Amino acid sequence: MAEQGNGQGSKARPGSRRVAQWMRDYVPLSGIPDEYIAQDGTPRAVWTRFFEAFAALTPAEIERRFGTADRHLREAGVSYRPPGETADKMWPLSHLPLLIDDAEWRQLTAGIVQRAQLLELVLRDLYGEGHLVADGAIPAAAIAGSPEFLRQVCGIKPPGGRYLSLYAADVGRGPDGRWWVLSDRTQAPSGAGYALENRLVLSRAFASLYKSMNVERVAPFFEAFRDSLRSGADRDEPRIGLLTPGQFNETYFEHATLARYLGFLLVEGDDLAVSGDRVHIRTVAGLKRLDVLLRRVDSNFLDPLELNASSQLGVPGLIDVVRRGGVVVANMPGSGVMEARALLGFLPSLCRRLLGEDLKMPHIATWWCGQTSAREEVLSRLDEVAIEGAYRRDVPGFPGQSPVLAGELSAADREKLKSAIRDRGMDFVGQELVRLSTMPVWDQGRIAPRPFVLRIFAAATAQGWTIMPGGFCRIAEQSDARAVSMGDGARAADVWVISDKAVPATTLLPAGDNVRIRRIAGWVPSRAADNLFWLGRYLERAEATLRLIRALATSPRDPVKGSSTVLHAVERTQRLLLAWGAISQTARTQPAKVVAEALQSEERFGSALSLVRSAQRTATTLRERLSPDAWQVITEMAERLALEVEDDDAVIGAAELTLQELASFAGLAQENMNRAAGWRFLEMGRRAERAINTVRFARQFAYDEATGEDLDVLLTLVDCQITYRSRYLVGPLLAPVRDLVVLDPYNPRSVAFQVAALNDHIANLPVLKENGLIERPQRLAVAAQATLTTAEASSLHTQTLFSLEQDLLNLADAIGLHYFPHGPHATRPEKLTGLA
């Protein structure tokens, strides 16, 4: 875009002597960012105030504060997934914010509010009476050619009264120094959650500077948005869900952040079911009515019955429920049609027609090639415009490229492009080539200019459109970037709107005098309960594997040093690791490699590293339910186990530290989680897995002919050495060891203790049948507890232990089938209680 104020001449010098010296030290004269300099060539006051504070900091202090920001991102697990990649990356936050003064922000706000009003009116007409197309204000082909125009939605009055509940616009500096709209976001605008996370990070790293700069708070925007969604429902205390495509979506972290911050349920399509004219959430207490659905799934994938039949992300029958007014969907399905670039050229005339005024914030000059005159204009100026897809990000015929610049194409590709435009011009638009304004970034200890795009968010409320004071800023790494997306090596920045007066601290928490006292935590969705159950199982399984590794690493494996009985115990330990998938058969022939492979093999599904990573993946789906401390513990375990170990001492050290971290997680869950259904399922996963593993330990090392060394290994594995020695003044004997490990209800590591805990948790969960009969999970748990209560140590033979293990496995499976229904079980044939 226009090059304004490149730092040339005396006017471009900072107004403060300290800032002037700081700028000479950290900023090359030819590299002063555009945003720092106003149209008259003088430094903008907001940037001068900001750099005054920076000039007072030493280089070491600056790096320390930047390190604080990076550490928070790492510990909180703030991440995103670039399109086409399978692994998450740490959120690339720029350490410097984008600053906008209050007067300039008011101009931006006016343009965004007007644009949101206009697009809402256009959507009402397109899916309603259709006057705009009938009168020729919009060519029918420009609408019909968009895959986001849903004929199934035509004639439906949106429940809640609005097509757009959340709107966003990508804006940048224009050739004349004003802000210009680059694109509209009406489908399911992303970035608000990341904008919130950016603010949390930088406001902590620069706490005093943040307060002194009078930065406008973003909490009132989210409060207004949340209240607006609530008011759209038809009951006083609605249940609101945020519909996500799932953990493999590139912005899943943001979905979890918004759900946690706004107090919404994070749900996937499989969590929801249609019953009558309502949408319900599958919970562990049965189906519960959902009133509002904030969607982050594209419209075409919302309902496989009426839209994309191959979709596994949506809810069968959802469109019919919307048609009947049974659920508010924000944004309304089909609203993504307004993102088509083909419509940009018609917005100025539509604004005059519908609002009676000109656009306050223009967009880039755009020609839709579906019209003859526009097509010829684009072809005659092919080297002067950028070619974009009219309806999609990619340009048809040039996958992965957007925009396409004819001047950079080969002669063959240039002719291919021209032919495509002539043959099917409706798929293409030509847009004016523009240069993005630059903002300051911190690059290797110096200030550097980088192009940026600002996404501004607007929420529809009863009082009109409310604008987030700030937004989501994306910064390109290339100095000549024309567009910026997070998949193109960009970084993000917080956006500070600077007020002329003090800004009061705000929060989403309601005032104390208007809060209804409640002591219910709500019912957890079945999918979340399933993931909590398996998170507990994975962590407990990892603990059992680590205990085996530690026992093996501290045992002599050399025939010269170890007795035959000790070596026999070692052999049984290795056999158990092999059966659990922690080591390969090949590794058993190389004793020195056994413990290292069991600890950190990426190929073995049962290694400690693989199990912790499985727990980490499961925890990713629970971001809205886990505290930052709990997430940090899981992340640190995965990072530690991935470090290369050199010898048995390193293996022992890594295993012991990881076991301590597992104990820390258990303590966090025990002390910090509410005693609601979610905590119970996490605990049930841990107790079920510990019971199964302890029986396997007993079967392996307390078999009928077990030696003292075998029993000693067992006591070590279940952490009962001290208890046994204080209770029995003799060496390990079979009957007392079996009693302590399997039957003792007072031993928190025994099988009996785990089964008693499972019985308690199951008894406190909701009953799903109305026939008064005991349900299968509780029936199996009660039977197992009765067996353990009445058994005697002398009767616990190897075959008895094997049968007990099978009973516990069946109990774990029964819990899953009963509370986490999937596939054919998801319909639940029995009549449900609590259908609300």
Image (cartoon, grey):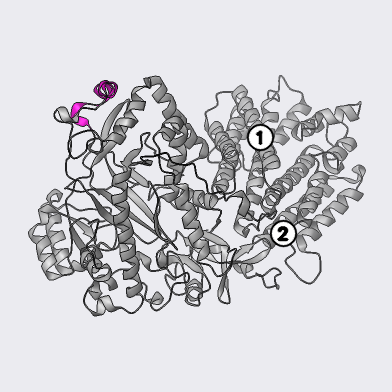
Q: From the viewer's perspective, is residue 532 above or below residue 19?
A: below
Which contiguous range is marked in magenta? 17-32
Give yes or no for residue 443 being in the magenta stretch. no
Query: Would you name the residue on which mark 1 appears?
Result: 664
Question: Residue at point 49% right, 51% down?
Answer: 258
Quadrant that contains the C terminus: bottom right
Type of secondary structure dominating the magenta stretch: helix
In the image, is residue 436 above or below residue 806? above
Residue occupying image coordinates x 34% and y 31%: 50
Residue 77 is situated, as x and y percent measured from the top left of the image, at: 50, 40
Q: Residue at x 86, y 38 (%)?
A: 740
Please give the count of numbered marks on the rendered protein: 2
Q: Inspect the image, locate mark 2, and give the three-letter code of the amino acid beneath it.
A: Ala
Query: Quick one: 800 or 18, which is closer to the camera?
Result: 18
* Image quadrant in which you'd find residue 138: bottom left
What residue occupies the far front of the structure in this picture?
A: 501
Residue under label 2? 814
Whether 556 is drawn above or below 529: the answer is above
Marks 2 and 1, Cα distance to the nearest angstrom? 29 Å
The x, y position of residue 776, in whole percent, is: 77, 62
Let me know if residue 20 is in the magenta part.
yes
Q: Can residue 835 be seen at all in this image of the molecule?
A: yes
Q: Is residue 244 visible?
A: no
For marks 2 and 1 on the same chain, the one whose residue lies earlier in the sequence:
1
In the image, is 41 to the left or to the right of 822? left
- Disc 1 is placed on an element classified as helix
Give the class, few, some or many, for how many residues have Cα within 10 Å of label 1's Cα (few <14, many ≥20): some
